[in-house]
Image (cartoon, helix red, strand yellow):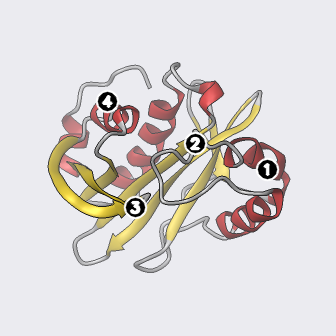
Amino acid sequence: MGRPTYPIRTARLTLRPVTLNDLDDVCSWQRRPDVFRWTLSEPRTREESRSSVIAMAGEDALRVEGDCSTLAVATDAGVIGTVELVWRSQTDRTAELGYVFHPDHGGRGLATEAATALLDWGFTEFGLHRVYGRCHGRNAASARLMARLGMRQEARHVDSYLFNGEWADQLVYAILAREWSRRPLRGQ
């Protein structure tokens, strides 16, 4: 089983399991259309956010292939986002990185800091071989985040999925454990 020792602390952040007490903070970004601009989901009502928080609260470890570990990213201002690893293959030791942050906290490297801490756990403690991430082909902010993490763009799947009734490209980024261990340490 893969379960970090909680909380995971960085210079400015605390990463920990999501709890029902995080509902107000999660609602503050899940109700915003700009948060869902590049996703297949829609802004959520408070009750939908409550269901989302309950689901995330159960995602505190990687027990079996297919599990998701979703961590609340907390500052003194409260929970400003989440980062997650989805265990995609036990045999191939592969996971998928995901993240969502309140836009009011953008531009300060907090998402990079949180994702770095989770990836570091995934590679050094959980023993992952490869982590990948995906985003809409026009989601430049997400692509830049993955590049800052040292992930390389491996693919651009052209017109690969329907997005709001139109065909859209999907970008795929990835990094291997050996690349993670050799990356220059930039401001975490």
In the image, which is nearer the foreground, mark 1 or mark 2?
A: 2
Q: Give the Cα separation between the discs numbered 2 and 3.
A: 19 Å
- Report which quarter residue 48 is drawn in: bottom right
Query: Up-down: is 185 above or below 95?
Result: above
Q: Residue at x 22, y 72 (%)?
A: 92
How many numbered marks appear?
Answer: 4
| Disc 4 target residue | 148
- Report which quarter residue 74 is drawn in: top right
- Bin the neighbour count of mark 1 within 10 Å (Cα to Cα): few under 14, some 14-19, many 20 and up: some
In the image, which is nearer the foreground, mark 3 or mark 1?
A: 3
The residue type indicated by label 1 comes to: Asp
- Report which quarter residue 185 is drawn in: top left
Q: Give the Cα separation between the discs numbered 3 and 4.
A: 31 Å
Numbered label attached to residue 35: 2
| Disc 1 target residue | 22
The residue type indicated by label 2 comes to: Val
Of residues 82 and 27, which is closer to you in this image? Answer: 27
Of residues 14 and 137, which is closer to you in this image? Answer: 137
Q: Give the Cα separation between the discs numbered 1 and 2.
A: 17 Å
Residues at discs 3 and 4 in contact (Cβ within 8 Å): no
In the image, which is nearer the foreground, mark 4 or mark 2?
A: 2
Q: Secondary structure at mark 2?
A: loop
Residues at discs 1 and 2 in contact (Cβ within 8 Å): no
58 left or right, relative to 63: right
Residue 53: where, in percent of width, then height?
73, 61
Q: Give the Cα separation between the discs numbered 3 and 1.
A: 33 Å
Sequence order check: which comes first, mark 1 or mark 4? Answer: 1
| Disc 3 target residue | 165
